[in-house]
Amino acid sequence: MPPFPAPADPTVLHPMEGQPRVVLLKPLVTSPLIEVGEFSYYDDPDDPTAFETRNVLYHYGPEKLVIGKFCALATGVRFLMNGANHRMDGPSTFPFPMMGGSWTDHRGVLADLPVRGDTVIGNDVWIGHGTTVMPGVRIGHGAIVAAGSVVTRDIPDYTVAGGNPARVIRHRYDEEDTARLLALAWWNWPLDHLTTHLPTLMSGTIDALEAAAPR
């Protein structure tokens, strides 16, 4: 197989020449509460560089948003974090202690919110246009989420999910092949090696991908 040119650069903010609507997230984000792997990108014709404020909402911490490598996030994908939650154990869900005045005196005992932990997006995940991801869910490696979905619960590895609430529509691979793909973890391959084997990765078989794996 002939050698390929140098791999793409994961530190470039706008990886597609002439397409300012696409940004790589790793060189963009500054919040210590957001972790993003190399080459994961967001596409937005308005202002993709506002991802941290327009697409990650109610992010007051300490829970994190963790996005793996090689993820594709379409326009309008939003992550609602735990700060969006309200107490539901009494007659009213209104956050009185947050509104100021003497109500703040009750903040210590009444302001605790339901917490679901970190929101974790695996590697090689494709999330469709306008999808909302609720707090604390995990979207597995290789998963595809249909446009307009509302993800309220975990989505397994290598499945296609969609709807409101999002449910598994089908499995991309059977259980054995999914395990083989997870064991390969191609997203951790050296970039030069990955570049050489892109045709296999994008259109080959799992057998061929296993044969191409670094030794």
Image (cartoon, grey):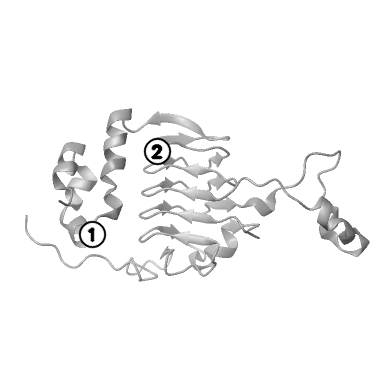
Q: Residue at x 45, y 54 (%)?
A: 67
Q: Is 155 drawn above or below residue 81 in the view shown?
A: above
The x, y position of residue 122, in whole percent, is 42, 48
Residue 95 shows in this picture? no
Q: 12 or 153: which is nearer to us?
A: 153
Kindly identify which residue carries mark 2. 157
Q: Is 89 drawn above or below residue 25 in the view shown?
A: above
Badge 2 local density, few (<14 within 10 Å), some, or many (20+)? many
Q: Which mark is residue 198?
A: none
Choose the circle earlier in sequence order: 2 or 1.
2
Q: Residue at x 52, y 61 (%)?
A: 34
Amino acid type, callout 2:
Asp
Question: Looking at the image, do the residues carrying marks 2 and 1 touch, with CB atoms under 8 Å apart?
Answer: no
Badge 1 local density, few (<14 within 10 Å), some, or many (20+)? few
Kindly identify which residue carries mark 1. 190
The x, y position of residue 32, in whole percent, is 54, 66
Q: Is residue 181 left or right of residue 207?
A: right
Q: 48 or 33: which is nearer to us?
A: 33
Q: Secondary structure at mark 2?
A: loop
Q: Residue at x 83, y 57 (%)?
A: 107
The x, y position of residue 9, in whole percent, is 29, 68
Image quadrant assignment for residue 91: top right
Which of the image's four quarters has the N terminus? bottom left
Q: Residue at x 33, y 29 (%)?
A: 175
Amino acid type, callout 1:
Pro
Q: How many badges with numbers are in the image?
A: 2
Q: 190 or 41: which is nearer to us?
A: 190
The x, y position of residue 125, in whole percent, is 40, 47
Residue 42 shows in this picture? yes
